[in-house]
Amino acid sequence: MNTSDFLFTMARSSRARSAASQQQCGSVELRALIKELPSPPRLQRSNLGFDLIAEIKLRSPATGQLSALVDENLADRARVYAEAGAAAVSVLTEPSRFDGTIEHLILTASALAPLQVPVMRKDFLVDAYQVLEARAAGAGGVLVILRMLERNVISEMIDTALGENLFILLEAFDENDLILAKELLEARRSCAQNLLLGINCRDLISLQVIPNHLEKMAKYLPQYLPAGIASVAESGVTCAEDAARMASAGYDLALVGGALMSDVQPASLAAAMLTEARKAVAARTVLTRVAH
């Protein structure tokens, strides 16, 4: 399997799911439904310099089954994440490789609405309809993978998300992705609070984490990340020390899935990640002040 094979397979499956959903409920009907819904919770960053997007993911293609949680436990897990300090909860909705469903998103969003913590739909989204579908399910944000899509499609998806007051996480892997991301984000800096740029350190061929990739790519962020837009370290963060390394490297958030899903005390792990990462931010701030 090469890079394009995995993403092509995921994109093809996603397009089929989108087409099937549109047969059941078209865009016009979906927009009408959304108008009757309350606004989703907004992404609220802390003032402590680092935040966590905690993920609900039942299976990973790289490591297999992560959790045997059934639907009624998903809401409880989401609340655990939120109460441990997560700024948002990511929910996998891809069915073939991750055992996700849109119903998982609905359950999680409903559970977190009283806590005012947004839920992000994580999937291999391919069109603006799926952004609306996420909003209708209660999502406060969506993930879009830059490597998968044409620029005009990405632009439409971003604008659809922003028009619905959703935050959007653009996922990049290499410098070429960052070039495109900068152009897309610069044009929308007035919505910076709803824009995130993520770096994925998982190899798109082997699906294994590439050691030190996040630190390597962090060096490009000052060049490509527009001011006011937060950066997210994706994959490979498994412990509090990893979170601290990401904070020291300059990332503003970490997206953590497998480690939290497989830990018997996810609240403790999430809290420890935040504590150590925020210590690292504080130490970096002191060093910067001394240097100046």
Image (cartoon, rainbow, N blue to C red):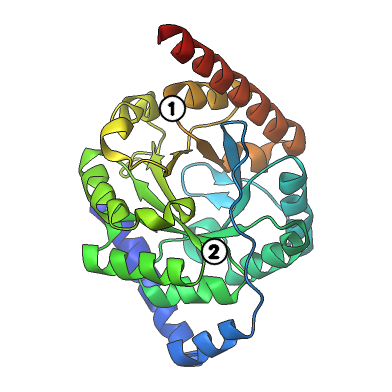
Label 1 Cα neighbours within 10 Å, binned few <14 / some 14-19 / many ≥20: many
Along the viewing direction, whichever of 73 and 96 lies nearer the viewer: 73
Left or right of residue 69, residue 196 in this image: left
Kindly identify the amino acid type of the residue bearing the numbered disc 1: Gly
Q: At 59% across and 44% down in the image, what residue appears?
A: 45
Residue sitting at the far front: 292
Residue 260 in percent (x, y) is at 65, 39
Residue sitting at the far top: 290
Residue 192 in percent (x, y) is at 43, 52
* Spatial CA span between label 2 and label 1: 29 Å
Residue 145 lies, with reference to residue 109, above or below; the image says: above
Dot 2 falls on a residue whose secondary structure is: loop
Left or right of residue 79, residue 241 in this image: left
Image quadrant holding the C terminus, namely top left
Label 2 Cα neighbours within 10 Å, binned few <14 / some 14-19 / many ≥20: many
Left or right of residue 144, residue 246 in this image: right
Residue denoted by label 2: 93
Dot 1 falls on a residue whose secondary structure is: loop
Q: At 30% across and 43% down in the image, what residue appears?
A: 205
Is there a contact, CB below 8 Å, between mark 2 and mark 1?
no
Residue 97 in percent (x, y) is at 48, 58
Along the viewing direction, whichever of 201 and 52 lies nearer the viewer: 52
Residue 291 lies, with reference to residue 172, above or below; the image says: above
Q: At 67% across and 64% down in the image, what residue appears?
A: 109
Residue 105 lies, with reference to residue 67, above or below; the image says: below
Say which of marks 2 and 1 sits in front: 1
Residue 22 lies, with reference to residue 278, above or below; the image says: below
Identify the image quadrant of residue 5: bottom left
Q: Is residue 75 visible?
A: yes
Q: Which mark is residue 250?
A: 1
Q: First in sequence, mark 2 or 1: give its number.
A: 2
Q: Is residue 126 visible?
A: no
